[in-house]
Amino acid sequence: MAITHEKVLEALSYVIEPELKKDVVSLGLVSEVKVQGNSVSFHLKASNPAMHYRKRLEEAAIHQVRRFLGEDVTVLPEVEALPKSSDRPQEQRKFLPGVKRFIAVASGKGGVGKSTICANIAAGLAKQGYKVGLVDADIYGPSMPLMFDVENEKPGLEGEGENNKMTPVENYGVKMLSIGFFAEANQAIVWRGPMASKALKQMFSDVHWGDLDFMLIDLPPGTGDVHLSLVQDIPLDGVVIVSTPQNIALADARKGVGMFKLPEINVPVYGIVENMSWFTPAELPENKYYIFGEGGARRLAEELGVNLLGEIPLVQSIREAGDVGRPAILQEYTPQAKALNDMVNKLLQTMKIS
């Protein structure tokens, strides 16, 4: 029987990548297949860099090629590890491969409206028809249950035994999970760093999220254990930094951008959102009062070489919308809804999604 390129690929299609649970051919892990007489060689990529893991995959590939093409065939595979999860194509990720993009929303300091911006990005993307998930990773101050009017909801359960997983709570087309669903409203959450990081990881791995276009992650303010654990465990595609215009907030925003640009973290910064940019009183709709300073985030974005994704006004109804559990981006024909929608559209443009 003549050995062909196609027959080699057919044989390798019976090799299952242990962590990714699919065959190596459909995952695009086989390349440079060469046939020379009775000898076959190819490159094969493994999800796990450990030598014993790569050896196991090599042995499976040799077995399947010989099973299909004959025991006398010389099989010369070269097995190497895939890059880190965040640098892989979606189908080659072992962590939530059904999620196309992971986006973190962060701030250098508290009180700048990070969670409000995150909630409105999520609701705005869902309004445009995207499948959206949201993890409230602000372990110590979870606010998403209130902002989405699901304070009294609890995640469901599906599956049995080891396959038992939680199902997220959903409203306005956004699937979400928050530590706030597991604590009383007046209960303080006092956890050391490792406990918080473990809880965060479980909100991803122990939940049936299904297929999503975007997973939004509302991070705690600052730079700490949760942030470092996140970038180690989750293949972040990018981050949005939220600030207000005053210098003290911008200084912390600069540190936040710097953290994600560190070589050991290296997560793209999609841009900065300036919240509370100006105040316009209802009785003077044409007036703008720059209470916290003017153009600070714009100057910072230019200095750091990142996009300014939006300038969101300080409007009472944005706060009220969060308090009643309906993100302001869902309002019709208001200046604040327009500013929030423009922000979402600029984010999509930055990600080159039309």
Image (cartoon, rainbow, N blue to C red):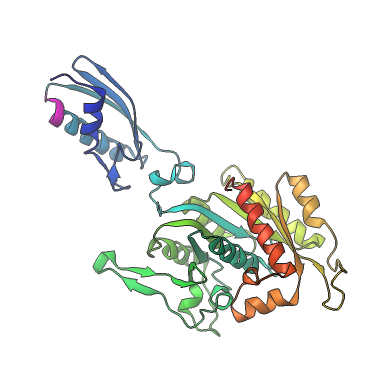
Residue lying at 83% horizontally and 56% vertically, measured from the top left? 295
- Residue 176 to residue 182: above or below: above
Q: How many tags in the picture? A: 0
Q: Where is residue 82 in the image (x, y as percent from the top left)?
A: 40, 38
Q: Which residue extends farthest top? A: 37
Q: Give the range drawn in magenta.
A: 67-71
Left or right position of 250 against 332: right
Residue 208 colored magenta? no
Q: Where is residue 230 in the image (x, y as percent from the top left)?
A: 51, 56
Q: Is any part of residue 220 visible from this angle? A: no
- Residue 8 to residue 2: above or below: below
Picture quadrant where residue 15 is located: top left
Left or right position of 313 against 219: right
Residue lying at 86% horizontally and 66% vertically, measured from the top left? 290
- Residue 116 to residue 214: above or below: below
Q: In which quarter of the image is the N terminus?
A: top left
Q: Position of residue 147 (x, y in %)?
A: 59, 75
Q: Where is residue 115 in the image (x, y as percent from the top left)?
A: 62, 68
Q: Nearer the viewer, residue 180 or 280?
A: 280
Picture quadrant where residue 188 is located: bottom right
Residue 70 colored magenta? yes
Query: Magenta-highlighted stretch: main secondary structure?
Result: helix
Q: Is any part of residue 280 visible from this angle? A: yes
Q: Nearer the viewer, residue 21 or 25?
A: 25
Residue lying at 18% horizontally and 33% vertically, measured from the top left? 64
- Residue 349 to residue 177: above or below: above
